[in-house]
Every structure is written in structure tokens, then in C-alpha cells.
Amino acid sequence: MIGRGIPLVDLAEVYPGERPDKVRAALDRFALEEASDDPQFELGHAVLAAVFGPTGEIERRDTLLRWFEAGSLSEPSFPIQAHYHLLLARDRDGALAGVRDCFVTVDAAAGLAVVLLSHTFVFPDFRRSGVASLLRCAPVGLARRALHRAGVKRGEVLLVAEMELVDPADRACAVRLFAYGKAGYGLVPPEILPYAQPDFRDPALATTPLSPLPFLAVVRAVGEEDRLSLPWVRVEAIVHHLQAVHRCHCRPEDLAPIRDHALAGLARWRQAHPGAAGVGLVCPSDARALLPFLQSVVLPLYPEPWGSPWQPDTPDAERAALLRAWEEPEPAR
């Protein structure tokens, strides 16, 4: 297959904060493989569904199976083409260490690939082993291969993760965000891009109306990480690329409010900052950096029904709880 000569993990493109020496050691210890048959799909999907299924944060099995079997569900004439990938990480004995799935979207005319880092899970026995780093780095290789297949010699690559709003009681959420910060990712301020994920439930079986789920957009611009900013046209492109995936398996009437709400936030920011070319990203380096992303701070940016699954405390109480959890002093006001 065209592009197979491009490695999944290229050490030259590993962000320094990801510790290339650790990634190199993990490459020696673990094998990354892309699922290519039904048993591999069933194995990987079962792991992810067990973790993300109970909270409705994963597409239905039949949906992902159609993506897996077809590779792409994009209309051939659509300018942004999307492909599904499922990666398995195994140790030398063949034991499954971690799973990642993602969608790679390519706009060949714009020379841009965006990877939606859908879900990842590392088994407890393999945490701190470098597997998580491999699963964070491998999508760059998938994007490079996709650009190559599309006839784009180099192009730009954006890695995008949809992360839950910060809950002071959920220590694992903060740990994941800190790991993304070390790996060169930044958070798009939700007042600029109030992004939401579609409700993936089956409309015919849902007992309550489908409602978007507010999420944070976490972005790594490969090769441009240290700038900690993103041109507004690329922020806008993120919305269109993610919707290029979801339009293949979600109803248009469920996607339009998400798109319109997110782009309206970006339009307001552009109007307020007419000379700004770039949107500043926030590096999730410590608990203080997470304060603007608390549930109680972010949910008011969305239509009230979208925030119904959450019942946050007041902003002051959540700020204090988060800083107390990480033993950091209150910022001066």
C-alpha cells in the first residue's frame, strides 16, 4: 500500500516533552499493529467499548464496524476524506498492552491532515511503560501516510483530542491533560471554540432526546508545538474535519447545531480581535492552567440542555477543590 514505507512512529517527530528516549525504548519492547481483520477489530473494540461505552463516548459497534470494513465512508466527491484506524500495542509475549482508534481526515487541496484521536486505553500493568506515548505518537505516521496517498508530499498535520471538561473530583482527567501538555498539545479556550461531540446513541432506541456533549479541543500542530498558537483558519478547519467524520454516521440535524455553535464562538473572537492571526492555546501543565476548563466555568458557554449530564458546583468551589487536590495555592485575584 502506498505510504507503508512511512513509519508509524518517527522518532524525529516525537515532541521532546514526550521523551524520545522513552519512546525509543518502548519501540524496542512493544509492537504496534494496525487491525486488519475482524478478530483484531473485535478484540480492540471490546476493550474500548468496555471503557467508553457506559458514558456514551464511543460510536455504536455497527457504525465502527462499517468504518473498519470499508476503510472510509466518505463520499468520493467530498473535499475532506476520512478513514478509520484501530491500533493494537502488544508486548514481546503477545500480551495486549493498549488500544487506540482514530480517524484521519485529509483535505488534499489545503494540504492538511487532521487526526481525531477518538479513544485510547492502556492496561494498568503497562502504564508508565511508554505504551501511552507510542499510542499518542503513532497517529502522526497515519496522517503522513494519508497525505502521501492523497498526493501531498508533506502537508500540515493536526492531532485533535476531544477531552471531557475538568472535574476536580476526577484526578485521572487532570493526569491525562498533563500528559497531553508534556506531549506538545494545547487546549483551545472554549470561549473561542465551544466544541461539542455528537450524541452517539441510536435515535430509534434513545429514551431521551439526543443532545450534544460539551468537550474540550486539545490540539497538537506537529512541528509547530512551541508556538502554542494556531491560525484561526486552522481552528475553523478542525470543526469541518471532525464533522467530515461524523457526517458519515450522524444525522445532519444533530450536527448542524454543533457546527453552528462552535463557529459562532470563533466568529465572535475574530470580531473582537480583528488583527489577530492566531488563537492562543493553553498548555495544560499544572492545575492552575486547568482552572478555565472546569465544568462550572465552561458549561455556561453552551445551551443549557447540552450540559444536563453534569451537575457542577460553583466556580469558586471547583477552583478551590482542584487546587487543593493538587496542593497548589489559590491564584492572586
Image (spheres, rainbow, N blue to C red):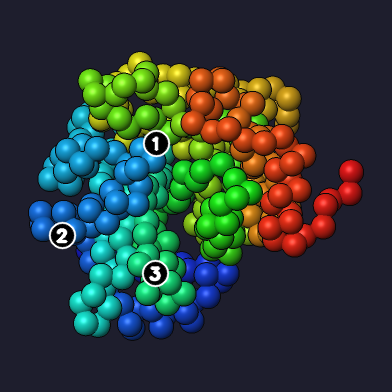
Contact between labelled residues 1 and 2, with CB atoms less than 8 Å apart: no
- Whether residue 72 is visible here, answered yes or no, is no
Q: Which residue is mark 3?
A: 124
Check disc 2 and report its element: helix, strand or loop.
helix
The structure residue drawn at horizontal position 47% and vertical position 79%, both measured from the top left corner, is 22
The structure residue drawn at horizontal position 83% and vertical position 52%, both measured from the top left corner, is 330
Is residue 200 toward the left or the right of residue 46 in the image? Answer: right
Residue found farthest to the left: 38
Q: Which residue is mark 1?
A: 242
Which circle's residue, 2 or 3, is located before the other in the chain? 2
Which circle's residue, 1 or 3, is located before the other in the chain? 3
Tell me the kind of residue under disc 1. Answer: Leu
> Residue 206, image x and y in percent?
29, 24
- Residue 231 sits in quarter: top right
> Residue 286, image x and y in percent?
68, 59
* Quadrant the C terminus occupies: top right
Mark 2 against mark 3, which lies toward the viewer?
3
